[in-house]
Every structure is written in structure tokens, then in C-alpha cells.
Amino acid sequence: MEVKKINKNIYFLRLEKEEDIISSLKAFAEKEKLKGAFFYGIGAGKDFTIGCYDLKKKEYLKKRIKKDGEILSLIGNISYVNNEIFVHTHILISDKNFKIFGGHLFSAKVTATLEIFLLLIDKKLQRTFFPEIGLNLISFKKLRQ
């Protein structure tokens, strides 16, 4: 990964071939001791595992897409669950037949490049478990310095 700090609250990241998207973002957040961030990006990847949350079952329905694809949109945030960094990411992918796939991103590898614009926030984003939803959601009650 190449990193360029634009100013005190903005980074530009470029992930390289074979880097895992989620673990690379998590490692970057740990290294930089980020409190929270929002990001978006474009690029190309492969071996995607995406999901769609089933609210009734309170679980993700997952799909693995092994083929290469254009990452049309990568968007997400970095927060904390029980003091551990959590990278929450959604993605839109186009295959060579221009078929579009999208959902929550669990994993993927970069094939050529992934360019990410990352905006820091100065408050620690905390997630709390909401039993009625079945997920850890950002808690504004816990939003602190």
C-alpha cells in the first residue's frame, strides 16, 4: 500500500495487486491509530465475498464471486466494536459482461489497483449491539473524543 497524507484529516491510499482490501484498511487504521474515518474508492479486484443482511434471520446471505471485476464503488467507514477496529464496507462490482454485483464486502483482493480517499474524524466511532437488528451499529451515545 502506498499512502499520501493530503492534510491532517485526509489520506489518499493506493492498494496494490494481491492486497486484501479489508485487512489492509484495518492494518492502516491500527498503524495510524485512527479514531474513525469514512472512505470511498475505485479500482479492480477478484475473489469477492459479498453479502446482503436478512433482517428476519438476523444473518448475512453471502455470495462468493471468484471472477475479476471492476470496483465501480467502494464506500465505508472505520469504527470500533469492543475496542477493536471494524471496517464496514459496501461495494459495487462489474464483471467482463457488465453484470453488476453489490453488497456488504467481507473480503476481496486487488488485481491492478484500488484508489481510496479516506476522511478522518476526530471522534472515536463506537458500535453497540442492537438486539432488535442483530448487528453492531454506530452508537451516537458513545461518540466521544
Image: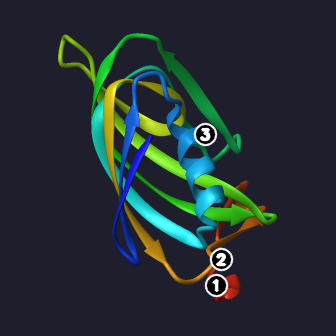
Q: Is residue 73 visible?
A: no
- Viewer-side label of 3, 2: 3
Relative horizontal placement of residue 140, taking residue 89 as reference (left or right): right
> Residue 132: image x %, image y %?
73, 62
Secondary structure at badge 1 equals loop
Q: Of the two numbered discs 3 and 2 on the same chain, state the one appearing first in sequence.
A: 3
Secondary structure at badge 3 equals helix
91, 113: nearer the viewer: 113
Q: Quadrant of the N terminus?
A: top left
| Residue at which label 1 appears | 143
Q: Look at 66% across and 88% down and name the residue there.
A: 144
Task: Find out whether the residues at labels 3 and 2 contact each other: C-beta distance under 8 Å.
Answer: no
Q: Of the two numbered discs 1 and 3 on the same chain, state the one appearing first in sequence.
A: 3
> Residue 128: image x %, image y %?
74, 69
Q: Is residue 120 above or below residue 31?
A: below
Give the image's coloring scheme: rainbow
8, 94: nearer the viewer: 8
Q: Is residue 34 above or below residue 77?
A: below
Q: Quadrant of the C terminus?
A: bottom right
- Viewer-side label of 2, 1: 1
Residue 80 occupies quadrant? bottom right
- Viewer-side label of 1, 3: 3
Q: Residues within 10 Å of mark 1 (few under 14, many from 20)?
A: few
Q: Is residue 38 above or below residue 23?
A: below
| Residue at which label 3 appears | 23
| Residue at which label 2 appears | 139
Secondary structure at badge 2 equals loop
Q: Look at 55% across and 52% down and name the residue there.
A: 88
Residue positioned most to the left: 98
Q: Is residue 17 visible?
A: yes
Q: Distance from label 2 to label 1 (Cα)? A: 7 Å
